[in-house]
């Protein structure tokens, strides 16, 4: 739902648009002015490469990995200064970006309008454009009045993205500077380059001190960003930190090149300005080390999510890259890793899938040369992977070397399983019963000692020397009964109970007579000596 409002200003109708949520509340819009001078009066341009304002704005408006561009110098020709991009102004309009935040369970959008205030120099005279006034642009008074107190009006101005857009605006998409932007609340990001040291840093530190004092006097919301933190000098960072403790302002360490704490710098300003309208904006200031870990964690999470997506989605070697580029997983990975690295992940996966398909062909499993030939032909046919042909060829060599090593290495057999301690064929031994001293004379060879043990160690058992009859206090076994027990298989089963009343009659198995081994004749055929 779009609501159009018409406001009368000085006899002109100005149309304003607001995007509405389901609760019919307009999304807040914030204008963020990025401040900081690349060089002061008396400094040579060749000795300084900028303080990182443009890279900070670029990374926030265009957060993609492939969108980042360096080299936004302020030395222009007179025709470039008069172009629609510069429009004879000492500020750049970077366009707008919208971020969504979770505010108490509901999604809330915040629109950011980003402007960068700088000083443009003429390439011939090496002097700032329009520097004939009483307050030069490069002076503290002139720069502060322009950046803080000037109205935001520049009809016909278009957004800036890179230096080529100044000379060839028809080749790029641009946004017209919106009228009435000055009515929105403002916030400020003061940039300080901590990769510099010496007199240049000292002069910019004094400029930052005066600018912070001026913003506090005007009751403006701001944050100080220490840019180029990945290349920072320790002494410069300590001096800026000491100034932040003395003047009690918010300091955040950022790196536009590594994309660390860039969005957080703008979000902290938005949280200060829109304290009542945007409750979902994060306000915590992370240290550079913690923010760098968070960035690496997000990159690793996106990589793992994309690889997991490929495992489920791409199961055929004929899958095309164009069908994957429109998915959300691909866009999220390309946002943090770039298109080149994301496409390389896809190329590696489809080559692995194709290798699995080739392995099913007859004769390929044990033939490395045939496998390599199949894979090289597959890469040559894939026109969508032509940019990664050299990478895939190296990957094919590694795959074939791995297959060759697997074929040359004998398979490792698992260790043999030890036999069980008790098998069904094994008969458990009888329980040990100690023999009292007075019964040792009864233990001898043959059946006498065994009867004693199987009768539970009864010391009253008496054995006679008569082989045809065995005496026992409880039962008497005759020769006929003994022969019957020898021939009855049920009686030859061992008993594991020592009670005589439940014991099976008959000799134990190890006392049974074993049949004599049969003689076998083996004929061996020996070779003849005559051949």
Image (cartoon, rainbow, N blue to C red):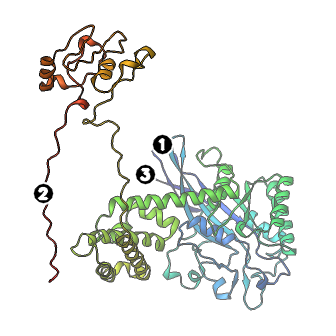
387 or 72: nearer the viewer: 387
Q: Whole-percent x and y of residue 193?
A: 76, 69
Q: Whole-percent x and y of residue 294?
A: 60, 56
Q: Residue 240's quadrant in the figure? A: bottom right
Q: Mark 3 or mark 2, which is nearer to you? A: 2
Residue on which the image places disc 2: 521
Ranked by sequence position, the earlier of labels 3 and 1 is: 3
Q: CA distance from mark 3 to mark 1?
A: 11 Å
Q: Describe the element under mark 3 as helix, strand or loop.
A: loop
Residue on which the image places disc 3: 1
Instruction: Say the numbered circle drawn on residue 23.
Output: 1
Q: CA distance from mark 3 to mark 2?
A: 107 Å
Q: Residue 37's quadrant in the figure? A: bottom right
Residue located 25% across and 35% down the image: 424
Do labels 3 and 2 touch, CB within 8 Å?
Answer: no
Q: Residue 435's quadrant in the figure? A: top left
């Amino acid at each position: 739902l779009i609501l159009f409002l018409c406001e009368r200003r000085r006899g002109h109708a100005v149309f304003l648009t607001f995007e509405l949520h389901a609760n019919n509340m307009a999304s807040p819009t914030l204008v963020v002015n990025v401040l900081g001078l690349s060089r002061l009066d008396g400094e040579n341009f060749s000795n300084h490469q900028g303080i990182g304002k443009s890279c900070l704005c670029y990374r926030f408006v265009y957060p993609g990995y492939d969108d980042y561009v360096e080299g936004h110098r302020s030395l222009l020709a007179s025709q470039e200064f008069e172009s629609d991009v510069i429009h004879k102004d000492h500020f750049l309009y970077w366009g707008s970006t919208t971020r969504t935040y979770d505010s108490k369970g509901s999604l809330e959008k915040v629109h950011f309008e980003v402007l960068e205030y700088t000083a443009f120099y003429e390439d011939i005279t090496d002097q700032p454009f329009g520097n004939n006034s009483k307050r030069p642009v490069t002076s503290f008074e002139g720069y502060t009045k322009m950046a803080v107190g000037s109205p935001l009006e520049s009809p016909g101005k278009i957004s800036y993205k890179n230096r080529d857009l100044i000379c060839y605006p028809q080749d790029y998409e641009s946004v017209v500077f919106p009228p009435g932007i000055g009515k929105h609340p403002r916030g400020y990001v003061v940039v300080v380059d901590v990769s510099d040291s010496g007199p240049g840093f000292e002069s910019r530190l004094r400029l930052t001190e005066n600018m912070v004092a001026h913003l506090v006097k005007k009751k403006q919301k701001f944050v100080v960003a220490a840019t180029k933190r990945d290349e920072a000098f320790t002494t410069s960072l300590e001096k800026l930190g000491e100034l932040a403790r003395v003047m009690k302002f918010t300091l955040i360490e950022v790196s536009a090149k590594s994309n660390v704490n860039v969005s957080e710098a703008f979000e902290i300003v938005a949280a200060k300005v829109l304290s009542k309208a945007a409750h979902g904006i994060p306000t915590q200031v992370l240290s550079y080390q913690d923010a760098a870990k968070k960035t690496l964690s997000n990159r690793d999470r996106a990589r793992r999510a994309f690889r997991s997506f490929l495992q489920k989605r791409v199961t055929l070697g004929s899958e095309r890259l164009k069908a994957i580029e429109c998915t959300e997983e691909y866009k999220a990975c390309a946002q943090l890793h770039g298109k080149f690295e994301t496409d390389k992940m896809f190329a590696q996966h489809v080559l692995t899938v194709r290798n699995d398909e080739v392995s099913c062909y007859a004769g390929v499993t044990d033939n490395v040369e045939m496998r390599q030939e199949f894979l090289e032909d597959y890469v040559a046919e894939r026109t969508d992977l032509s940019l990664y042909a050299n990478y895939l060829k190296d990957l094919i060599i590694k795959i074939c070397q791995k297959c060759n090593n697997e074929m040359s290495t004998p398979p490792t057999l698992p260790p043999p399983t030890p036999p069980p301690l008790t098998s069904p064929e094994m008969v458990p031994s009888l329980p040990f019963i100690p023999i009292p001293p007075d019964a040792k004379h009864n233990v001898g060879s043959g059946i006498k000692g065994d009867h004693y043990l199987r009768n539970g160690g009864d010391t009253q058992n008496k054995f006679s020397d008569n082989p045809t009859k065995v005496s026992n206090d409880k039962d008497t076994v005759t020769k006929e009964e003994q022969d019957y027990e020898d021939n009855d298989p049920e009686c030859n089963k061992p008993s594991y109970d020592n009670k005589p009343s439940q014991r099976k009659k008959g000799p134990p198995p190890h006392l049974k007579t074993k049949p004599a081994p049969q003689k076998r004749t083996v004929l061996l055929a020996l070779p003849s000596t005559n051949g």
